[in-house]
Amino acid sequence: MKIPLIDVKISDPNMRTEIGSTLSRLIDSTSFIGGEEVNKFSEEFAESCGGGYCAPVGNGTDALILALRALKVGPGDEVITVPYTFIATTEAISVVGATIRFVDIHPKSYNMDVSLLEKAITKKTKAIIPVHLYGQPCDMDPIMDLAKKHKLKVIEDAAQAHGAEYKGRRVGTLGDAGCFSFYPTKNLGGFGDGGAVVSQSKELIEKVNQLANHGRSEHYYHEVEGINSRLDSFQAAVLRIKLRKLDEWTDRRRAIAEQYTKALVQNSFITPPHIESYAKHVFHLFCVESPSRDELMRHLKSKGISCGVYYPLPLHLQPAYAHLGYKKGDFLISERLIERILSIPVSPSLTDTQVEYVCSALHQFSPKTLIK
Ligand SMILES: *Cc1c(COP(=O)(O)O)cnc(C)c1O
């Protein structure tokens, strides 16, 4: 059996037909930038985040950049985030001219360790970017409390967490702004790049929309200098059709995760993800921890099961950030996790037979070597 780590194929023939006919209609309409599909997607996506407003943009990285810009984060400001995330989170901070400040993750949730946050706040701190890693929301209440106390903005990086819930509320609209990516492999993915900023503030979303469209207030009248970062109508059309299935796909991811977790109960060499009591985890990735990670990876691969390491090097040790002056030992939880973490297939399209096959492979694993 061959099981891919991530499967972006459209397996439902009806959906395939619907996407085909919708794109074909759009070709005839020649409405390629903006228009009804984009407007409708914005409304529907905001609705799926529990209300509020949505600015559709070119990709998830731009969503973060534009949210920071709209919240007036720039040169001289510090932004706190975690070193254990995809580099887009910190690229956005640098692009707006602000300074990256890291706090380590919590060893169980893999998300920002909130107990370290207040110590990292300085007079220059302007914003916090909690990342809902792998699809599990961060502990938002204490983050929002600290932000209120120190007058900081909170921008959720929800690129891996479409539909995730914190204490029953959907992520994205818990902070000042929430940023999503519709990169093809994300839980809601297009046929190319795409992203969105969501917020409870209509004013903020209007600002993001303006910045994403050359700072326009009229076609050739520019209120401010913006950029070009628009979601195109083809992507919006695909995303609208796929959004209707998102909750069903999330349920499937959660059911697969539950089966894996059960299969691991008796295996002391593999630890399934810890799910916080406040969290509805949407399992963008299902990551296990093992003291014999490399051997586990070889074991699964020998059985045709693809797996991957997210992430092999934390951001503070990346060559791109050598100038920040961090060193090995600065963020020990992140540094330890990169040796132990392994992501296994959790695509909603996996069949029951495939899931059972992965379960038995997990169940059977017994390492010959152990690392600390
Ligand atoms: C994917 C991702 C992004 C960036 O999204 P793009 O659409 O690829 O630009 C940002 N943050 C995290 C945590 C991501 O996983």
Image (cartoon, rainbow, N blue to C red):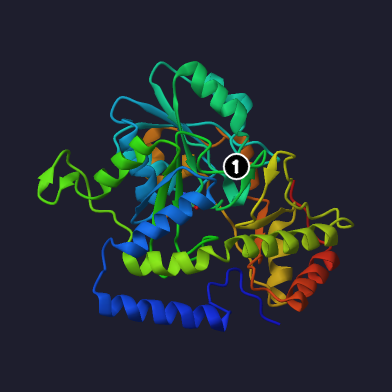
Query: Can the viewer see residue 120 in this picture?
Result: no
Query: Can the viewer see residue 173 in this picture?
Result: yes
Q: Residue at x 45, y 65 (%)?
A: 239
Q: Is residue 334 above or below residue 74?
A: below
Task: Name the secondary structure under disc 1.
Answer: helix
Q: Residue at x 42, y 30 (%)?
A: 79
Q: Is residue 150 above or below residue 367?
A: above
Q: Name the quadrant of the C terminus.
A: top right
Residue 110 or residue 141, whichever sits in front: 141
The reply to whether the residue tagged 1 has its Cβ within 8 angstroms of ligand 1 is no
Residue 141 or residue 272, whichever sits in front: 141
Q: Position of residue 159 (x, y in %)?
A: 49, 51
Left or right of 204 in this view: 128: right
Q: Is residue 34 above or below residue 107?
A: below
Q: Position of residue 78 (x, y in %)?
A: 39, 27
Residue 168 or residue 363, whichever sits in front: 168
Left or right of 136 in this view: 30: left
Q: Amino acid at mark 1?
A: Glu
From the image, tell me which residue sits under label 1: 335
Q: Residue at x 40, y 68 (%)?
A: 237
Q: Residue at x 30, y 31 (%)?
A: 74
Residue 173 or residue 186, whichever sits in front: 173
Left or right of 353 in this view: 60: left
Q: Position of residue 345 (x, y in %)?
A: 66, 67
